[in-house]
C-alpha cells in the first residue's frame, strides 16, 4: 500500500507570487509531494493562460523535486481523489482569508469526509501580497521584483506592454 502523503495546493496563481512560492516550499518540506493545481475557471478572465501559468510555476519550482504542477477544472475534492491525495493545502493571510477559507474547507468536508484542508500561515513579509496587488502595480510599470519570483517578472511586464 502506498502511504505517501500527497498535498494538493489549488489556486489561480495568476500570477504566482513569492507568497505562493513560500507556501509551496514549506509544503514540500512537510509532505511527500505537493501538486500545485492551477484552477481552470472559465468565468474568470485571467492575465495568463493555464498553460502559461503551469510553465511559470514549473520554472519557479524546478529546484523542488517533490513538487508537481498540473491543472484541473471542476471540484477540487474530485481532483484530489483522482490524484490519490487526502490533503488540500491553503495559505492564510488575513481575517478575510480565514472566513472564505473556512467556508470552503467546511464545504469540501461535506463533499468528501476523508479529505482534510491544512492551512499554513503566510510568512509575515508576504501577508499583504496577492496576485491582484502584483497586477495593480505592474500595469503602471511599478517595481514587482520583490513580489514575484525573478523568473516571471519580465512575463508580467510584457503582458502590459502589449
Ligand atoms: P484563489 O483564487 O483560489 O484564492 P490564489 O492563487 O489567489 O487562488 O491563492 C491560492 C492560495 O494561496 C489561497 O489559499 C491563498 O489564500 C493563498 N495565498 C495567496 N497569497 C498568499 C500569500 N501572500 N501568503 C500565503 N498564502 C497566500
Image: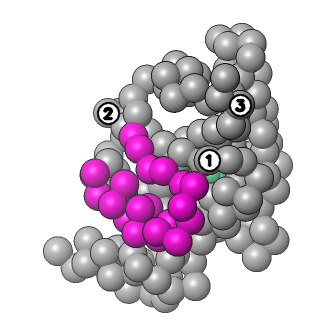
Image position, residue 137 (x, y; %): 47, 77
Is 57 within the magenta? Answer: yes
Residue tagged by mark 1? 33
**Dot 2, crowdedness within 10 Å: few (<14), some or many (≥20)?**
few
| Real-space Cα separation, disc 1 to disc 2, in angstroms | 28 Å
User: What secondary structure is marked by label 2?
Assistant: loop
User: What secondary structure is marked by label 3?
Assistant: loop
Image position, residue 117 (x, y; %): 74, 33
**Mark 3, mark 2: which one is toward the viewer?**
3
The residue located at (63%, 58%) in the rendering is 24
Image position, residue 116 (x, y; %): 76, 28
Q: Earlier in the sequence, mark 1 or mark 2?
A: 1
Residue tagged by mark 2? 42
User: What secondary structure is marked by label 1?
Assistant: strand
Q: Bounds of the magenta span?
A: 51-71
Image position, residue 104 (x, y; %): 69, 28
User: Is residue 140 rendered to the left or right of residue 109?
Assistant: left
**Dot 3, crowdedness within 10 Å: few (<14), some or many (≥20)?**
few
Mark number displayed over residue 3: 3
Amino acid at each position: 500500500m502506498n502511504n505517501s502523503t500527497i498535498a494538493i495546493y489549488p489556486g489561480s496563481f495568476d500570477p504566482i507570487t513569492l507568497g505562493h512560492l513560500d507556501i509551496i516550499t514549506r509544503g514540500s518540506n512537510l509532505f511527500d509531494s505537493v501538486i500545485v493545481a492551477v484552477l481552470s475557471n472559465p468565468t474568470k478572465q485571467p492575465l495568463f493562460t493555464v498553460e502559461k501559468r503551469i510553465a511559470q510555476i514549473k520554472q519557479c519550482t524546478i529546484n523542488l523535486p517533490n513538487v508537481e504542477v498540473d491543472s484541473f477544472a471542476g471540484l477540487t475534492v474530485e481532483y484530489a481523489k483522482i490524484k490519490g491525495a487526502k490533503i488540500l493545502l491553503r495559505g492564510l493571510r488575513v481575517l478575510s482569508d480565514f472566513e472564505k477559507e473556512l467556508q470552503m474547507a467546511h464545504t469540501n468536508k461535506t463533499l468528501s469526509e476523508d479529505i482534510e484542508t491544512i492551512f499554513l500561515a503566510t510568512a509575515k513579509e508576504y501577508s499583504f501580497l496577492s496576485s491582484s496587488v502584483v497586477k495593480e502595480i505592474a500595469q503602471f510599470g511599478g517595481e514587482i521584483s520583490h513580489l514575484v519570483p525573478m523568473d516571471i517578472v519580465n512575463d508580467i511586464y510584457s503582458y502590459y506592454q502589449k
